[in-house]
Image (cartoon, grey):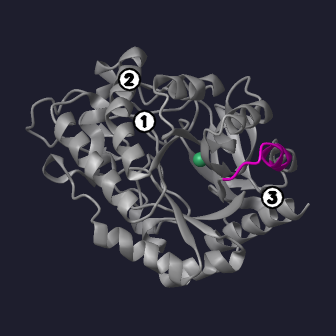
Amino acid sequence: MKVGFNLYRHLLTPDNFQFARQSGATHAIVHMVDYSGGQPSHAEPESLRSHVRTAANGDSDLWSLAELFDIVRMANDAGLEVHAIENFDPAHWYDILLDGPRKHSQIKNLKLLINRVGEAGIPVVGYNFSLAGICGRVMGPFARGQAQSFGMNGPFDDPLPPGMIWNTRYLMEGDIGCDVSPAATCTSEQLWDRLRWFLDEILPVAEASGVVLAAHADDPPLPMMRGTPRLMYRPEDCDTLLGLNNSRANQIDLCLGSVAQMLNADVYETTDRLTRQNKVAYIHFRNVIGKVPYAREVFPDEGDIDLLRIFQILRKNRFDGVVVPDNTPAMQCSAPWHAGMAFTVGYMKGLLNA
Ligand SMILES: [Mn+2]
């Protein structure tokens, strides 16, 4: 297995790739959008924290080949490979998620995007087929020594506003349908149908481009959030997704923290089952205490998951993908996010040596 490092858009600089390499990582997972979720990450500057994005004119610019090559070159210069791009921009595919009028032009654009990702030599694209996206989280002194991290403190939740998915406004005032929330118009069955359509369209292109699509579970893993259904909130939902299309490009981004927070889930059995099938493109490494809707993120050595046992399972199954820190608690110093990441990568290297 390989050790990865997660970099958000505003962190894609030569210094940060070098920092990643110095921490011990050999592979990078890069985000092309700083703030795609319903909540910001520690790594995001204060100015982005309450930012609602707008999908200009219904479609946003696609990532260019030159832009992708620049990122790959920056990583290579620091001695790293780019293993994956994580998450589409919600502006790229909101009508695919909503079965809206622009879905055909958007899937055409996503196919072009997958072509470019393949041409740039990036083997994986991570995604989360979700209307509400990452949401319902609070930040607090939840980890050891009062380190700041994310948690969920009960089933408190605001409905998704009309004209919005994730944190992205796709309809403006005056547009047709701008007063209807996606929550009002979608069942779980419909959302599964939309996912199947998406996979049937995109996977042949992904295969031809040498790119794997890796699905992340819903965060938090609950059947409804913000008034919208969610698809990936139990371990068996991963199997359902894999069963929709048997392409070798149809894979999972296995988030240990999300699985551990699922009710009645066995994170060891799930890790064993999915990696034995060679269906895991990469793994989000983090630790948590508790299950939804009461859970908090902690340092890797203080949570519910025995991460050494996870690494033993990965070794037994000869897992060849990348293990990458997900969110990490922020540590009290002048570089809180970097310190948390370096601690976590160091811990992963220790597990590997053990
Ligand atoms: Mn994750």
If the image is split into quadrants, where does the N terminus sit? bottom right
Asked whether residue 233 is in view, the answer is: no
- Which amino acid, by three-letter code, is at mark 3? Arg
Q: Earlier in the sequence, mark 1 or mark 2?
A: 1
- Disc 1 vs disc 2: Cβ atoms closer than 8 Å? yes
Residue at numbered disc 1: 129
Q: Which residue, given by chain and number where applicable, does mark 2 sit on?
A: 191
Image vertical order of residue 114 relative to residue 205, above or below: below
Q: Residue furthest right?
A: 354
Q: Residue 185 at x, y = what percent?
A: 28, 20
Element carrying mark 2: helix
Residue 250 percent coordinates (x, y): 49, 37
Q: Residue at x 62, y 56 (%)?
A: 327
Q: Main secondary structure of the magenta part?
A: helix
Badge 1: residue crowd in 10 Å (few <14, some 14–19, many ≥20): many
Give the extent of the magenta segment. 311-320
Across and down, in percent, residue 23 comes to 70, 75
Q: Residue at x 43, y 59 (%)?
A: 49
Residue 279 shows up from this direction = yes
**Identity, as a three-letter code, of the amino acid under mark 1:** Phe
Q: Is residue 89 left or right of residue 162?
A: right
Cα gap from disc 3 to disc 2, whole angstroms? 39 Å
- Label 3 near ligand 1 (CB < 8 Å): no
* Circle 3 Cα neighbour tier, 10 Å, few/some/many (<14 / 14–19 / ≥20): some
Secondary structure at badge 1 equals loop
Q: Answer above or below: position of 211 versus 116.
A: above
Q: Quadrant of the C terminus?
A: bottom right
Q: Residue at x 64, y 73 (%)?
A: 338
Q: Which residue is mark 3?
A: 144
